[in-house]
Amino acid sequence: MPDTQSDVAHLYLTDVRTRMRNLKALGEGALVQLTEADWHTVLSDGGNSAAVLVQHLSGNMHSRWNGLRHGYQAGLDGETAGRNRDAEFEDGKLSADKLRGVWDGGWAVFLETLDHLSPADLTRTLSIRGETHTILEAVQRQVMHYSGHIYQLVLLVKTLRGDGWQTLSIGRGGSAAFNASMREKRP
């Protein structure tokens, strides 16, 4: 008899791994359009630059997921004691190359953790700032969080590039042609 709960958990993990890799690629599609100076540009007082968004995402990914990187461990806290979250929102004026390394490092931790999670892990618990979450809840919390910041990044870069923006999705006026090409690909 099939284990429906395990099947759903497996489907969820497969889907979230794919979607988060696609989200990373979306962010990278925006980042490659930045000039060196653009990395540190904010659109308004109190706003975040691309550099700050990258620093924050990476800091969060390291804090939340490094302890689970090689599989579940009971008693884990997803807010590491050494994290300085406030410093993530201060532009360290790192070069574009260093910021790409920060980006890659954070995503490596998060994606490796997703790859090591098993369906059974999703109902296990961890703490984030003293609040208990199932692994499923913690993953979903971060899916929302990371998506929000990636779309901030896309808007920031799109605004900075103006007419030079290279779209990361279906371009305006291109829906009919895109839909037709998708239909042609179907058997």
Image (tube, helix red, strand yellow):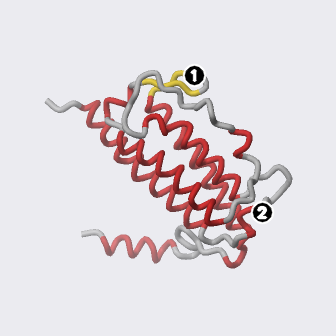
Q: Quadrant of the C terminus?
A: bottom left
- Left of 99 or right of it: where is 61? left
User: Which residue lies at the image location 69% right of the left edge and 73% below the top edge?
Assistant: 35
Q: Quadrant of residue 114?
A: top left
- Which of the two labelled residues, at mark 2 and mark 1, occupies the earlier sequence position? 2
Closest to the observer, 137 or 38 = 38
| Residue 121 image-quadrant placement | top left
Q: Amino acid at mark 1?
A: Glu
- Under mark 2, the amino acid is Thr
| Structural crowding at the residue carrying mark 2, measured as other residues with C-alpha within 10 Å and reported as few (<14), some (14–19) or many (≥20) | some
Q: Using the image, determine if residue 6 lies above or below residue 163.
A: above
Q: Secondary structure at mark 2?
A: loop
Point 70% across, 70% down: residue: 36
Tell me where residue 134 appears, x and y as whole percent. 45, 26
Question: Which residue carries the number 1 mark?
Answer: 131
Quarter of the image for the N terminus: give it.
Answer: top left
Among all residues in the image, which is located at the extreme right? 45
Residue 115 drawn above or below residue 166: above
Determine which residue is flagged by label 2. Answer: 41
User: In this orientation, which residue lies closer to the viewer: 72 or 125?
Assistant: 72
Q: CA distance from mark 2 to mark 1?
A: 35 Å
> Which residue occupies 63% across, 54% down?
54
